[in-house]
């Protein structure tokens, strides 16, 4: 009990210079809602955050991961919307929360219906081929696609996934066309490339890293604004001669609608402090993410723009949008 | 020689007292998680992940893997005793396991499940140790056309799962395929059969349907026949509670079949233990001399799938450890765990971390022995569950089913679905439709549709891709053969009748 109260005192003193010190402070365990089951991307990030919060003693209370799988993110978003005014619930969103309402009429809660808190990470990607592939550069691949329209193949996720968005943008800017084959699991996408059943894929840099080191895979370009630290020799899309918008995979935090302003201020600052810790930096570096911190106001602007851009891209891709 | 040296090294790691302890904790937790329907190994491992941070990575991976393969042992318990599948891989076990329990042979069924799990689990580890790199290579040569052929082979088994009427079996399988199509289509992001419910956007959970159609329907049918219901017989004496020599003899082929099928299907990134258990059950039935008794409580019908889902663990670790490719939910979270501990799972993992790999392999031999010793004494204990009067047993089954479904998703909507599928199962029983084909169609439907569409996208719409590739062509021919089996039976019957008339 004593240690708990001294912890609160410690946190309070840390926060003292900031305006919200006399405002909101979570009094009991905070639920962090994710849209995947245990082991999914968001779930792993949420649990890593919970561990960091404990290790760095950032909160007087515990952060607890709640899995609300189903509906491609819609169930978790609806869960948050139902918790209107709840001061002890947060949600960890990804691009899926944004795309699902765009294409599924059943998913009625958009990110606009929730309270923005903070953007946390941007996940870059790389474009990879099998090591024995004839394509040494992205231009060579595009050239081959131009010669054989529709013959080359890319493995990826659903047609609203970032993989397909990158393909759409490249196809549109170069006037070429190749097939996109959807696989539900990341493992199957990589297996399809390594088995020589498809020609190219968009993959997370950390996943590609080991296959490159083992000599099974080669990277042609990176889907990122700047070159990643671990891929200093690989050109970005722009440097490779393809001036298409970089579509990041985004992760961030939202809260239920109708929570007080002090809470938003507390949480956006809490996550800012989290992203400045040693543990967080190491996590970002290990996974080759980009630090993408934005406060609540910037995040709100970000997803307005992102939604509009995504709607355009999906329409171009022939996907039926409903909102 | 290199393998022997590695194994020695591995046992040195696994036999350290701390690692032995973590191995025991893992398999014990796994057994408990397996017995409780709903809460599966992925959820358990995810919850324990924070605790493993201060552990030695060898101890941590040994424990988490223990949960993974330990759960496969426990999964059969509720399938056999209550017709409630504990995990999706134990759904097939219900078919003959529960019938054995009804005949008073719950003990031998539970016992053979543990023994088959031990045999096949050990074979799976042997495979992981001896042939991981070539098997991984073989798995990569598998792509969508091959998966489609594999699933077709699986679906062809429907003719073997049919009861008296093949038409009714096919209708049930079609309903299963239809349920599998509910949700958002992966390729076009279009909603299918969601009736405006967002909960249905990601489809219907296999376990909800299986528990509804098997367990809930069973309770309803029995409640209706009130005066006929009586206690299930449980023989006294330890001897009657364990498999006999004859039982073990009957299961010889099942042990082999489960071990091989489980390992091979497990090694495929798009495989999984549910498909492995169905395939080995089908194969067992296809070659059995007493084919027509399957589904009435034959012991091989328990041994084959229970073996397959354990051998699958060794297989599933092959692509994970040799390529860094996870094939299932549980291996995906093991991968996440390795990354969180600072390892880089991938093609270089085994050469660069031999102590970890060989320690894990050695611990799996030890863990399987622990599980056998842990599970066999539990058999007589669990068999006593059936001594409960029906007015306690059926509400208990109902409760276990509901808790199991709710604990997967924490959603009341899924409980509603459970009720719907319970009613469907009840109607099917009343109208004499077999439920196994429905479950088979559901288990294979989504993967089969995906594989077909992927294949056609690869070939630009040419169906010939399905038969132009050798592995796929061979498996499709087997599927046709299986479909012809009932005809052989009929031909044989005509032949015999003709002989009699002569």
Image (spheres, coloured by chain):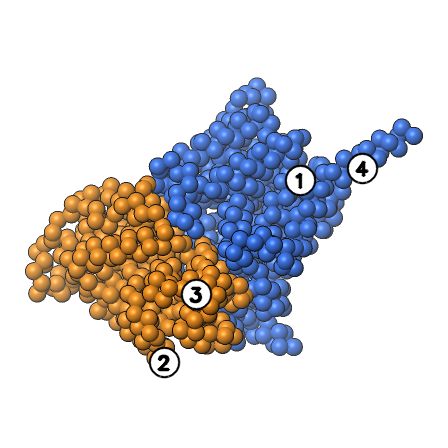
Calculate the distance from the C-alpha at mark 2 to the C-alpha at mark 4: 70 Å
Calculate the distance from the C-alpha at mark 3 to the C-alpha at mark 4: 53 Å
- Marking on residue B160: 1
- Marking on residue B492: 4
Question: Color used for chain B?
Answer: blue
> Which residue has dot 2 on it?
A233
- Picture coordinates of residue B11, whole percent (x, y): 57, 70
Question: Color used for chain A?
Answer: orange
Q: Is residue A105 in view?
A: yes
Choose between B66 and B260: the one closer to the eye.
Answer: B260
Q: Nearer the viewer, mark 2 or mark 4?
A: 2
Residue at 18%, 55% in the rendered image = A300
Are both tags, 1 and 4, on one chain? yes
Identify the chain of the residue marked 2, using the numbered disc in the image: A
Count of numbered marks? 4
Where on the picture, by quarter, is residue A62?
Answer: bottom left
Q: Are marks 2 and 4 in contact (CB under 8 Å)?
A: no
- Picture coordinates of residue B53, whole percent (x, y): 37, 65
- Marking on residue A201: 3
Are both tags, 3 and 1, on one chain? no
């Amino acid at each position: 009990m004593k240690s708990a109260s001294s912890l609160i005192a410690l946190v309070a003193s840390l926060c003292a210079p900031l305006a919200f010190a006399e405002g909101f402070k979570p009094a009991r365990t905070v639920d962090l809602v994710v849209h995947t089951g245990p082991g999914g991307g968001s779930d792993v990030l949420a649990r890593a955050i919970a561990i960091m919060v404990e290790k760095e003693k950032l909160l007087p209370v515990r952060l607890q991961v709640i899995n609300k799988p189903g509906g491609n993110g819609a169930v978790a978003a609806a869960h948050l919307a139902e918790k209107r005014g709840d001061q002890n619930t947060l949600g960890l969103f990804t691009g899926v929360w944004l795309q699902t309402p765009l294409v599924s009429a059943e998913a009625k809660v958009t990110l606009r219906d929730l309270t923005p808190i903070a953007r946390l990470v941007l996940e870059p990607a790389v474009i990879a081929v099998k090591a024995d592939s004839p394509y040494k550069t992205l231009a060579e691949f595009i050239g081959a696609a131009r010669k054989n329209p529709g013959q080359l193949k890319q493995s990826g996720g659903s047609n609203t996934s970032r993989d397909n968005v990158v393909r759409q943008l490249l196809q549109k800017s170069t006037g070429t066309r190749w097939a996109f084959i959807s696989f539900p699991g990341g493992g199957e996408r990589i297996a399809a490339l390594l088995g020589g059943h498809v020609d190219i894929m968009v993959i997370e840099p950390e996943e590609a890293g080991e296959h490159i080191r083992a000599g099974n895979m080669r990277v042609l370009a990176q889907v990122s604004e700047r070159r990643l630290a671990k891929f200093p020799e690989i050109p970005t899309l722009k440097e490779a001669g393809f001036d298409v918008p970089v579509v990041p995979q985004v992760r961030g935090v939202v809260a239920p609608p109708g929570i007080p302003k002090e809470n938003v201020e507390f949480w956006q600052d809490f996550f800012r402090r989290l992203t400045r810790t040693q543990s967080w930096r190491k996590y970002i570096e290990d996974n080759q993410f980009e630090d993408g911190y934005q406060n609540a106001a910037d995040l709100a602007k970000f997803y307005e723009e992102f939604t509009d851009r995504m709607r355009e891209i999906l329409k171009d891709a022939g996907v039926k949008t409903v909102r | 020689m290199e393998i022997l040296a590695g194994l020695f090294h591995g046992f040195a790691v696994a036999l350290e007292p701390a690692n032995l302890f973590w191995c025991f904790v893992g398999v014990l937790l796994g057994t408990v998680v397996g017995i409780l329907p709903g809460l599966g190994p992925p959820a358990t491992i995810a919850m324990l992940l924070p605790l493993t941070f201060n552990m030695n990575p060898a101890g941590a991976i040994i424990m988490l893997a223990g949960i993974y393969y330990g759960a496969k042992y426990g999964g059969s318990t509720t399938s056999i005793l209550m017709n409630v599948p504990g995990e999706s891989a134990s759904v097939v076990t219900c078919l003959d396991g529960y019938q054995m329990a009804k005949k008073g042979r719950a003990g031998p069924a539970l016992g053979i499940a543990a023994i088959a799990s031990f045999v096949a689990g050990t074979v799976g580890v042997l495979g992981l140790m001896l042939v991981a790199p070539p098997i991984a290579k073989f798995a990569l040569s598998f792509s969508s056309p091959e998966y489609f052929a594999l699933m077709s082979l699986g679906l062809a088994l429907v003719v073997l799962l049919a009861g008296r009427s093949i038409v009714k079996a096919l209708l049930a399988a079609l309903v299963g395929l239809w349920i599998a199509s509910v949700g958002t289509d992966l390729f076009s992001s279009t909603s299918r059969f969601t009736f405006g419910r967002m909960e249905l956007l990601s489809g219907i959970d296999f376990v909800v349907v299986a528990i509804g159609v098997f367990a809930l329907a069973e309770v309803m049918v029995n409640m209706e026949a009130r005066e006929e219901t009586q206690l299930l017989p449980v023989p006294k004496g330890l001897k009657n509670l364990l498999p006999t020599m004859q039982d073990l003899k009957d299961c010889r082929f099942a042990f082999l079949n489960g071990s091989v099928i489980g390992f091979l299907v497990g090694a495929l990134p798009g495989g999984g233990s549910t498909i492995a258990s169905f395939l080995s059950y089908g194969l067992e039935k296809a070659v059995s001399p007493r084919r027509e008794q399957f589904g009435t409580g034959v012991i091989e019908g328990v041994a084959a799938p229970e073996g397959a889902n354990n051998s699958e663990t060794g297989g599933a670790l092959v692509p994970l450890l040799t390529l860094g490719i996870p094939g299932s939910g549980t291996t995906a979270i093991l991968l996440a765990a390795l990354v969180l501990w600072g390892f880089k799972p991938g093609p270089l993992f085994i050469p660069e971390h031999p102590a970890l790999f060989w320690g894990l392999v050695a611990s799996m031999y030890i863990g399987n022995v622990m599980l056998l010793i842990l599970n066999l004494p539990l058999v007589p204990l669990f068999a006593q569950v059936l001594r409960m009067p029906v007015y306690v047993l059926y509400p208990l089954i109902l409760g276990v089913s509901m808790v199991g479904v709710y604990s997967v998703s924490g959603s009341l909507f899924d409980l509603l679905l459970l009720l719907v599928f319970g009613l469907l199962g009840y109607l099917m029983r009343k109208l004499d439709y077999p439920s196994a084909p429905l479950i088979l169609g559901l288990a294979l439907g989504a993967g089969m549709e995906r594989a077909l569409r992927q294949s056609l996208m690869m070939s630009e719409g040419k169906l010939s891709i399905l038969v132009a590739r050798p592995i796929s062509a061979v498996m499709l021919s087997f599927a046709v053969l299986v479909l012809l089996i009932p005809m052989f039976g009929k031909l044989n019957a005509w032949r015999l009748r003709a002989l009699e008339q002569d």
